[in-house]
Image (cartoon, helix red, strand yellow):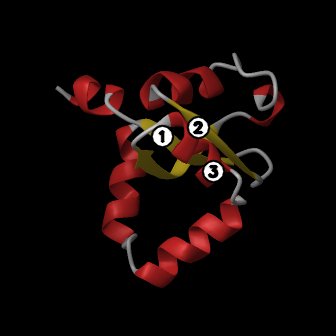
Amino acid sequence: MMANFFDKYYWVYVLQSLKDGKKYTGYTNNLPSRFEAHQNGEVESTRNRRPFKLIYFEACLNKEDALKREKYSPYEIKSKILMQGIISQGKKRITENYF
């Protein structure tokens, strides 16, 4: 059931490297698969920064919207989220444990 939910949207996501603490922003139409690819070293740009934790993701209705959102830096995305009160500690914990 969750696979159907994730397949309906494009996703903008922010990963944080547990190795160096740096953040990486990307977009995909299959979030669970893309996160797994990052963790397994299949993404060249993040291969040497594994492992990661998923610290943020949001759904976009189409690829064009996802590309626009990806242009924000992880810091801009995070500050917008915190300012809007979208993430609470409980929700953050859920997203980190889901993947």
Q: In this view, does 85 lie above or below 71?
A: below
**Of the residues shown, which amino acid type is indicated by label 3?**
Lys
**Residue of label 2:** 27
Quarter of the C terminus within the rendering: top left
**Of the residues shown, which amino acid type is indicated by label 2?**
Tyr
Local crowd at mark 3 within 10 Å, few (<14), some, or many (≥20)?
few
Q: Residue at x 69, y 67 (%)?
A: 75
**Of the residues shown, which amino acid type is indicated by label 1?**
Trp
Whether residues under marks 1 and 3 lie with C-beta atoms below 8 angstroms apart, the answer is no
CA–CA distance in space, label 1 to label 3: 11 Å
Residue 85 lies, in percent from the top left, at 39, 80
Where disc 1 sits, the SS reads strand
First in sequence: mark 1 vs mark 2? 1
Residue 29 lies, in percent from the top left, at 47, 28
Q: Which of 61 and 27 is in front in this view?
A: 61
Q: Mark number for residue 11?
A: 1
CA–CA distance in space, label 3 to label 2: 10 Å
**Residue of label 3:** 68
Q: Which of 60 and 20 is in front in this view?
A: 60
Q: In this view, does 25 lie above or below 80?
A: above
Whether residues under marks 1 and 2 lie with C-beta atoms below 8 angstroms apart, the answer is yes
